[in-house]
Image (spheres, rainbow, N blue to C red):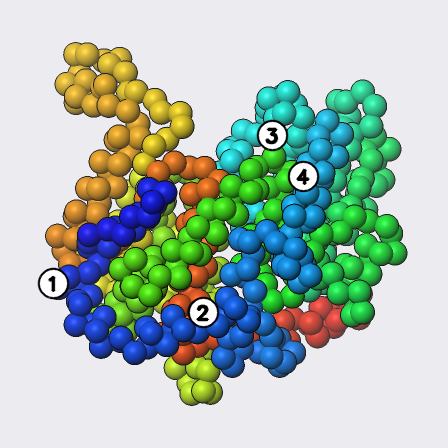
Amino acid sequence: MALTLKSGFSFDYDNLFGEGKVTQADLDSYKDALKAAHEAMKVMRETGFIKAHLSKDGNPEKVYFSKLPYITEENGKLNLNSPASIQRLHDFTERIRNNVDAVVSLGIGGSFLGNKVLFDIFCGEFWNTWTVEKRNGLPKVYFSGQNIDPRRTGDIINHLKAMAAQKDGKYKVMLICISKSGGTLDTMSNFMVMLDALKKDEKIDVEVVAVTDPNMEKKTLLKQLAVDNGWESFAVPDGVGGRFTVFCEVGLSTAAVIGMDIEKFLQGAQDMDKACQNEDIFQNPAMLNAALKFIASEKYGRNIEVMMPYGDYLKSLSEWYIQLLAESLGKQFDKDGKEVCYGRTPLVAVGTTDMHSQTQQHQEGTLDKVVQFIKVEKWADDLVIPNVFPDTKKLADISGVTMSEALEVARQSNADALKSNKRFNACFTLPELNEYHLGELMYLLAMSVAYEGELSNVDAFNQPGVEAYKRIMGPKLQELKASK
Ligand code: PA5
């Protein structure tokens, strides 16, 4: 059983639905809740309203992520994607082409994870070792700010200085500092350390670009710095929470730096949004995915979701999903203030790598998981396993098979083995690993957590739990500074 869209994108839920799994009767028992969730999504799309959603300051806040796939003048008024904002991103690409040597994107959480997905998938591991020509004049790209780690930050600084020392003339580094709130410790500490160190190197020219809340009346600290120093700025719009920002100028700033096809990415998201407007659950990927996993958790105790794409460069997609699921659904109280301690726990896994580590637990451990596979149907550069040792039967037997075929046989075998032992699993298939299908997938996952928020009656768009440690950490840092 699979839901296949016209684009070829599919959601195979055969090992999650039916006899001994989530049943039709289960779905029927949530018929009214599903209808209400679908209505709520309609209202969200049209007005941005989500029942009981409050911002960090306790004020009602609109939710606009579902508007991001649409490039319209109207959306431009809300700092969402408009023809002008997309053109500005294209101009940004051309401004840095053959002009900037290296970009450091600084951010954490929603201001990092989606950007890393785009970079890993479209640039791969060796982008920074390629010649400028092979990168079409685009810069090397580094990520920082996603930890307060002196070792790695020092390593990046030293690496950039070494690169600068090898170049005739000045080495141009652009620091893209991304923070919606504009003052996140992890991001800003790295930013200050890096800016200070690079500015002191006479071979390096540093330019800063700020990506933050654009509100000019109540400026974030980063916005104020951008205004004071004349830095170029991009917007993190109101109503778009960190984990949904890959479709706004947060993610799109990295897309522009690496020359990705932004319109295709948004088109994939838009077409998925349209599919998710279908009232028929079996034609609506987000509603179906959310409903099956919600019921699998509530009724069958499968409250861990292992996100397991097959392919190395997809690992960061799994890491992005961790934040999306954890921050959206891990909530102590429901929308009526009742204590529920809800939330499926997400886990990162990669096939085939983790078949040699985690699969033992998935196959035989606690019956508390849904394994969600992601498969790429057609890989751009496939390799045939050659017959290098014809006299060694075991190796000769796998020759002639492509690596992508072997990868899929491994995934399919894993799915079959899990199924044979009552282990729930499902698979998203991307026909190819391109901007369009990635847009489809990331948007589907974002819309799914929105549906699941409605089904479980928790606010999928706040994250009050992350304030608890911040309240402790702030004074601790002050104490530390005072003691110096
Ligand atoms: O989802 C979220 O809101 C968080 O994970 C944020 O993205 C993260 O804390 C970074 O925040 P900011 O962009 O304000 O620096």
* Alpha carbon distance from label 3 to label 1: 50 Å
- Determine the residue positioned at 13% across, 64% down: 20
Front disc: 3 or 2: 2
Specify whether 366 is left or right of 315.
left
* Alpha carbon distance from label 3 to label 4: 21 Å
The residue identified by callout 2 is 42
Q: How many marks?
A: 4
Q: Whole-percent x and y of residue 79?
A: 67, 59
Q: Residues within 10 Å of mark 2 (few under 14, many from 20)?
A: some
Say which label, 4 or 2, has the lower sequence index. 2
Residue 356 position by quadrant: top left
- Determine the residue positioned at 25% across, 41% down: 411
Q: Inspect this view and state whether residue 441 appears.
A: yes
Residue 437 position by quadrant: top left
Q: Inspect this view and state whether residue 184 appears.
A: no
Q: Residues within 10 Å of mark 4 (few under 14, many from 20)?
A: some
The residue identified by callout 3 is 128
* Alpha carbon distance from label 1 to label 2: 32 Å
